[in-house]
């Protein structure tokens, strides 16, 4: 009676704690099984805005032209039909942009050449399926591969939007250099354990 009142929170196990929004949210939020691609998209080395675009990709939520056709009569035969800003042949879709279309495919091929974990696929769903089982591991070659993949997706999407809405365009080599340099900046901030793989990565990414 001689102490001030305090707000407490009882968790799912019936234990009382000092109240916090985080604890309340952890108690009431809905839960589901962790998806296979979680560590490919969300990881401590990732850059949030790039992870967000990859998350939209795996959730099939990017606003590509095939999704927007239902809402826009101009894209559905009512006027100037929108087409992929790279090939200008068909409306873009996630599969088309990542990486069936010639321009994104060439950029992706350049990126694959410097990725320490071999990736042979040219379809983002197959790439995600290939990387997901090992994406939780924190070894250098997997971290670098995840960073390169997310950067490629992010900058291809950025380039697609720039061409559609501003008319500005970069070459395949210019776009690859942007991907390479931004991943390199991230790699320069990391600590590395000495190994054969790390030596190869440092040589490929010009860290030594």
Image (cartoon, rainbow, N blue to C red):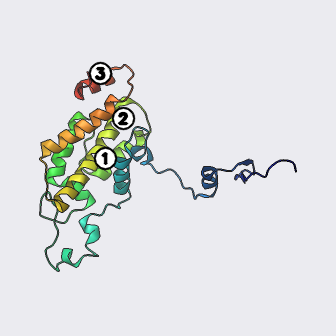
Residue 75 x, y percent position in the rendering: 20, 74
Neighbourhood count class around disc 1 (C-alpha, 10 Å): few under 14, some 14–19, many 20 upward: some
Q: Residue at x 25, y 57 (%)?
A: 95
Left or right: residue 138 versus residue 1 is: left
Q: Which mark is residue 199?
A: 3
- Mark 1–mark 3 Cα distance, whole angstroms, equals 25 Å
Q: Could one spot residue 86 in this view of the protein?
A: yes
Q: Position of residue 44 (x, y in %)?
A: 44, 39
Give the residue drawn at x 78%, y 52%: 5
**Image quadrant of residue 161?**
bottom left
Q: Residue at x 17, y 55 (%)?
A: 101
The mark that comes first in sequence, 1 or 3, is 1
Disc assigned to residue 186: none
Which element type, helix, strand or loop, lies under badge 3?
helix
Front position in the image: 70 or 26:
26
Q: Give the mark toward the camera: 1 or 3.
A: 3
Relative side of 57 to 172, left or right: right
Q: Nearer the viewer, residue 14 or 48?
A: 48
């Amino acid at each position: 009676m001689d102490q001030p009142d305090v707000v407490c929170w009882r968790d799912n196990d019936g234990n009382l704690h000092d109240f916090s929004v985080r604890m309340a949210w952890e108690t009431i939020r809905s839960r589901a099984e962790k998806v296979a691609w979680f560590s490919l998209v969300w990881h401590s080395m990732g850059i949030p805005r790039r992870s967000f675009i990859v998350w939209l990709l795996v959730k099939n939520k990017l606003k590509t032209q095939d999704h927007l056709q239902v809402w826009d009569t101009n894209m559905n035969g009512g006027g100037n039909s929108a087409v992929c800003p790279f090939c200008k042949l068909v409306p873009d879709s996630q599969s088309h942009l990542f990486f069936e279309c010639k321009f994104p495919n060439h950029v992706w091929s350049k990126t694959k050449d410097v990725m320490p974990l071999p990736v042979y696929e040219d379809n983002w769903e197959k790439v995600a399926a290939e990387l997901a089982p090992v994406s939780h591991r924190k070894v250098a070659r997997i971290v670098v591969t995840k960073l390169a993949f997310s950067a490629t997706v992010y900058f291809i999407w950025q380039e697609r939007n720039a061409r559609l809405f501003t008319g500005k365009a970069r070459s395949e080599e210019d776009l690859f250099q942007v991907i390479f340099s931004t991943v390199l900046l991230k790699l320069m901030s990391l600590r590395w354990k000495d190994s054969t793989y790390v030596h190869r990565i440092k040589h490929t990414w010009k860290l030594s």
